[in-house]
Image (tube, grey):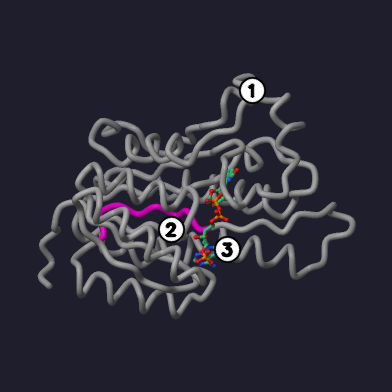
Amino acid sequence: MSDTLKNNLALVTGASKGIGRAICVELANAGYRVIINYRSDEAGAAETLALVKNSGSDGRVVQFDVTDHNATQDAIEQIIKADGAIDTLINNAGITADGLFIMMPRKDWDKVIETSLNGFYNVTRPVLEKMIRLKRGSIISIASIAGLVGNRGQANYAAAKAGLIAASRSVATEVARLGIRVNVVAPGLIDTEMIKDAPVDNIKTLIPMARIGQPAEVARVVRFLCSDDASYVTGQVLSVNGGMF
Ligand code: NDP
């Protein structure tokens, strides 16, 4: 494949379900070709691909674990060779391992940081290298309200997401002159598997809109930030949280 940038090839990490899947569908509806990354849920990723194709666009599924630096680097090189340069990157893969800080085993601290923060490094650096050569690109990372205000029982997660925000803002300043925009979306409580054990009824009382959000409501904001409608927006954090903060 030549260096010529084909229009709008998006890589979405953690897209076998939840918010990542909704982002793939939203981008497919907007005409993007979509590379659907997953870690373990092959069937879920295949379902996302079917939805992308139903939207009249195209894409494919690529398995890699964003915490594995070498595997991620290899996978991204392969994607660029086979599909062309990635001009839109959505760092969405994330996990939780909640618990009070005083009780938190080191492995739970590490695995959450490894995924959201080190994953950002592993995925973004090789993609950005190519974007810089082409002087075009948009990078959106999915953080969390926890990364802005902290959250009881989520010191690891809040730290990872706060780091993701700071890293994104820093990279944004480094590449702004090269035509590359870097932004963050910070959702509140969104209806996915990630919150299946959360006390949703209690939390709802803290949400001014008195409901949790839907993955598509995050995806639409991501699509806006990727698009030329957001051509003068970089280094920003956009909250999607029903007015929580
Ligand atoms: P889900 O648990 O529904 O989905 C998580 C996705 O991330 C899955 O596709 C999973 O892949 C993937 N993933 C996890 N670890 C890795 C890894 N190491 N490498 C590659 N993929 C990985 O979560 P959500 O859709 O709710 O969350 C998506 C993002 O939004 C996360 O970053 C999360 O922190 C953030 N967020 C979510 C909120 C919510 O209320 N739901 C609120 C605020 C932020 P697989 O299943 O294949 O293993």
- Which one is in front in this view, the residue at disc 3 or the one at disc 2? 2
Tell me which residue sits at (89%, 56%) in the image: 102
Tell me which residue sits at (38%, 40%) in the image: 222
Is residue 35 toward the left or the right of residue 2 in the image?
right
Tell me which residue sits at (68%, 35%) in the image: 149
- Residue that mark 3 sits on: 115
As drawn, the label of residue 210 is 1
Determine whether the residue tagged by mark 3 lies in a helix, strand or loop.
Answer: helix
Q: Determine if the C-beta at disc 3 is less than 8 A from ligand 1.
A: yes
- Residues tagged 1 and 2 counted as in contact (Cβ below 8 A): no
Q: Where on the picture, by quarter, is residue 105? A: bottom right
The type of residue carrying mark 3 is Thr
Task: For label 2, count other residues whose C-alpha is less than 10 Å away and answer few (under 14), some (14-19) or many (20+).
Answer: many
- Residue that mark 2 sits on: 15
Q: Determine if the C-beta at disc 2 is less than 8 A from ligand 1.
A: yes
Residue 117: x %, y % from top left: 56, 59
Q: From which residue to which does the magenta span run?
A: 86-93
Is residue 210 toward the left or the right of residue 36 in the image?
right
Q: Where on the picture, by quarter, is residue 218? A: top left
